[in-house]
Amino acid sequence: MSSAAVFRWGSIWAAGLIIVFLLSSYNPRQSSLSAIFGLGGSDWDILYHLGGNGPWIKKIDGIVAGGIHAPEGCEVEQVHMLSRHGERYPTSNAGGRMLTLLQRIKDSNITLKGDLDFVNDWQYFSLEPSAEHDQLTNTGPYAGTLSSFAAGTRLRTRYLHLLISIPNSRSTNFWASDCNRVIETARYFATGFFGLDWNSTSAKLHVMPETPDLGADTLTPGDTCLKYREDLMTGHDYGLIQLTKFRSTYLPAISARFQAQNPGIKFTNGELYSMQEMCGFEILVRGSSPWCDIFNHDDWLNFEYARDVIHYYRAGPGNRFGPAMGWLWLNATANLLSKGPDAGKLFFSFVHDGDIIPMLAALDLFHSKEHLPVSHRPKIRQWRTSQVVPMNGRIIFERLKCNRASKEKLKDQEKIPKHYVRININDGIVPFPHCTSGPGSSCPLEDFLAIVQRRGREIGDFRKICGLGDDAPARIEFLHQ
């Protein structure tokens, strides 16, 4: 390698370490859970109420105390990550609705007053919407390009012992669904994790088509599940149906508030929802947004819940196809966890939030006795997606090897399994329901595998549920090293 190349790589690596230090030291007022759940306090943080439309944040509620380090006497020997793409501009559909709203305001020839007076001089956060919609953001403190690279460097630091144990002659496979923002996320991540020349040395990116012909052998089962796509009432569109119902419970009051300040124009529920969406998406481009300030805390708690509703019913526990779609990756990962590091030590997959939500439904990690209501916002609920699938949100399954029992169980040491599984969601360890007997509230490997198999029997066959023929692939085959 030339001296110039060494200098260039050294500069990039040093910059990456600085970025990771800055991001890891960023603390969005995490000391007060009361602010997160809207119970008041001066440390309110809007980032925890954007329902997946905001930048990456740490999960801070419902986690195991003690941090993410391996429990005493244990080491991580295998890692499986399912990650959402990095911070992006709005999709073409959502961005198109925003632009239509702004054009209607302009065409009304009204000078807005009150809460909305800033709009008179405000400029949309994309100068080239047709080119930038759907793509990673690349400006501001929450740029998707930046956070994806930083995530790779952060995980390199955490799992360096696994990376350096892989022979130089062996290339590590990793995967991304065939969408530009997902592919770019994987590439920036790989640069941070494997190094600048990863594509020619230590890793190989496999791009998985987002096409309907793959059956169960896919990263994006929502594209291959035929009935899910065709059923307009209880399939993919069920989330939007339920979202529309809930939006009608809180947005009319906001409309009346704005109309009292501006009698010449009345906003629809859809337009008001777009205003709330612009808060998060402008943050992703510019770092802040005046759209965030025109809504009160209760408005944002309702928006957060609205996002919970659409995820829950579009591909989560409230959708009859969700668990079957999510069990595919979960089952493939469980099989690899059972084989251990001999099957490979590092497995990284990059997808959309709509592909992560079904996996959580299959695992039943955030169990609810009743479906989410759409007539009101419940005060207490397990299903909260803002901290689970923010932009660049990642779910990591770790296989732990523990060489000794915890002090409380030394007498039963011979009976305690040596291998355990735990789940890390956005740098917070989340306990498996009814399986926390291992070190650091981890789940014994055999118990975890039994849970996954039981869920598979309860959920049923993906092909039958989705209306696919017996000749369609029945399981994920591509996930291997």
Image: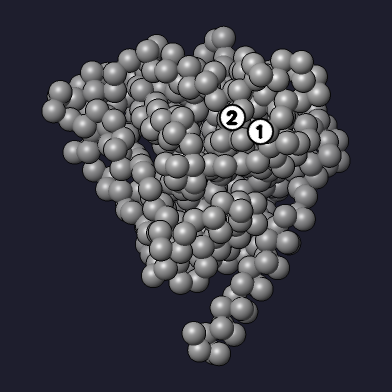
* Residue receiving disc 2: 419
Q: How far apart are marks 1 and 2 (CA)?
A: 6 Å
SS at circle 1: strand
Residue at 47% of width from left, 59% of height from top? Answer: 167
Q: Give the amino acid type for the residue marked by disc 2 in the picture.
A: His
Q: Where is residue 432 in the image (x, y as percent from the top left)?
A: 61, 22
Q: Residue furthest front?
A: 414
Secondary structure beneath label 2: strand
Read off the residue under disc 1: 402
Instruction: Kindly indicate the quadrant of the structure image that contains residue 214.
Output: top left
Residue 104: x, y in percent? 46, 51
Q: Earlier in the sequence, mark 1 or mark 2?
A: 1
- Left or right, 91 with respect to 230, comes to right
How is the structure coloured here? one colour
Q: Which residue is drawn at 44% across and 13% down?
A: 454
For label 2, the crowd category at 10 Å Cα-Cα, with few meaning under 14, some 14 to 19 and many 20 or more, is: many
Image-based side of 409 in relation to 11, left or right: right
Nearer the observer, 376 or 219: 219
Tell me the residue at 50%/28% (across/down): 360
Assess whether mark 2 and mark 1 are in contact (beta carbons under 8 angstroms). yes
Residue 236: mark in rendering:
none
The answer, for residue 465, to whether it is visible in the render is: yes
Q: Which sits in the foreground, 212 or 278?
A: 212
Q: Which residue is drawn at 80% across and 45% down?
A: 29
Examine the rendering and report whether any part of residue 94 can be seen. no
Query: Quadrant of the rendered structure where residue 344 is?
Result: top left
Q: Residue farthest to the bottom?
A: 3
Rendering coords of residue 180 (x, y %): 37, 57
